[in-house]
Image (cartoon, helix red, strand yellow):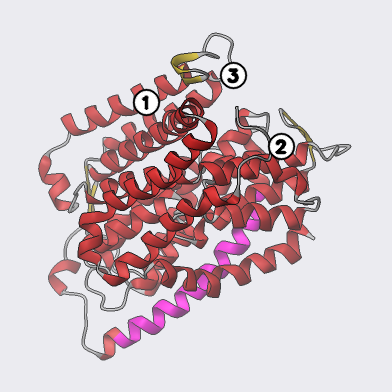
Amino acid sequence: MVAEGSVSLLFCIPFVGMLLSIAVFPLINSRLWEKCRKYAVLLWSLAFLIPFAICFGFGEMSQRLLEVLVNDYFTFIILLFGLFGVSGNISFQGGFRGTPRSNVIMLLIGTFLASWIGTTGASMVMIRPVIQANKWRGRKTQVFVFFIFLVSNLGGCLTPVGDPPLLMGFIRGVPFFWSLRLLPVMLLNTGILLVIFFLLDHHAYKKDMAEGIVYASSESEVHFKISGAHNIIFLGAIVFAVVLSGVLTHTELFSGGLPIYRDVELGYGALIEVAIILLAAFLSFRTTDRKIRMNSHFSWGAIQEVAVLFIGIFITMIPALMLLETNGARLGVREPWQMFWVTGAMSSFLDNTPTYLVFLTTAGTLGAPAGIDTAAGMVSGGMLKAISCGAVFMGANTYIGNAPNFMVKSIAEENGVRMPSFFGYMFWSLRFLIPVFILDTILFFL
């Protein structure tokens, strides 16, 4: 075992290198990056794994690696694969035209849908209709940036289904509908961001009109139609599998798992989840006409990119999470506003689920006299609200803050949308999200 405090910050260098590679190399040569990103992932992963094995032994390194691959990455990528594949079998024709008003309506629908089928599910269901509605627009980057802000992140705060951190909270004793208490924060943030978006999109829309970019009349005559609507059943099955896995994990019958190596095991609940997701995806593809996927411009490029990049992120962030687990309680974070910003800052670059768990555990050690009785201890309502909002909301700060962010970016670019670079996207979040989060702090967490 690795002794407490023995992991040096130097082990985090490969993680920083991984992030910088994702941020910088596409700016230098995007085509070369597409061909070589798997080698960059391998390089930075080995840059962590080899020194770690030298310092702590091959067995310890293998256990840490398998823990993150089996317990985190495997279920993560299977869930994304299932949602990506099933949603790709649903095609929308006609309906909304990409005006500022209709774009606001679509973002609003996606935002509230996210709490009930997850941010990933809502993103995959809504992204193609939004692309379809705006394909005629010349200036549309803002549509997809705010799509990530709202649908891929903020919308997932109302139920444990919405985002994995809240599911972990539910598993550890937070009542299922407790998250509905975050509704005032979500409504404020959604309202402010939609107003800002409308103003930006209206300005861009007027420029498009001035340049003679108009919506083709032939397209406007197409009636609204959903093809492959039966796949909504399979989306529901995937959401059910996620919740079922969380519930089964804490039942005596399914408390164990399939042994992998040392203390690493794949939980029976996770196995059932994976089986249901793969079955739902299989039945979705077997029962859906290929023409529907063609109409949706479906391809596997986005999920392949996410699978490659996130395995590198998951591996290289191991020491960062180890340091956070060891030192989280020593950070002196004792007030809700501190929890909101520290949890959010970590969730912007690390996996927000373990970050949530670290600070939920930290909050449980503070000895709150009343609040929510969790497996980590008694946590005050204000603390839990701050941790939940930080983990869910601030995943929107970067492309890697939440998996749907990168998938939306990839799908949009596949369809000819010019998306900001890694740092370019952060400039958007600094301008529009951080001021909203400061307002949240003043109104809800002080």
User: In the orientation shown, which residue stands out farthest toward the bottom?
Assistant: 210
- Between the C-alphas of marks 1 and 2, the distance is 28 Å
Report which quarter residue 73 is drawn in: top left
Give the residue at x 80% y 37%: 365
User: Residue 197 location, x and y as percent?
Assistant: 46, 73
- Does residue 415 show up? no
The magenta segment: 182-207
Q: Is residue 196 left or right of residue 300?
A: right
Give the residue at x 45% y 44%: 48
| Element marked by disc 1 | helix
User: Residue 324 location, x and y as percent?
Assistant: 64, 45
- Does residue 42 show up? yes
The residue under label 1 is: 274
The image shows residue 126, relative to residue 311, as above or below, that is: below
If you read the primary sequence from the N terminus, does the residue marked by circle 1 or circle 3 appear first? 3
The residue under label 2 is: 361
Tell me the amino acid under the disc marked 2: Thr
User: Residue 47 location, x and y as percent?
Assistant: 41, 47
Q: Main secondary structure of the magenta part?
A: helix
The residue lying toward the viewer, choosing from 132 and 5, is 5
The image shows residue 331, relative to residue 433, as above or below, that is: above
The residue lying toward the viewer, choosing from 139 and 90, is 139
Dot label at residue 250: 3
Residue 97 counted in the magenta span: no
Few, some or many residues within 10 Å of mark 2 (<14, 14–19, 20+): many
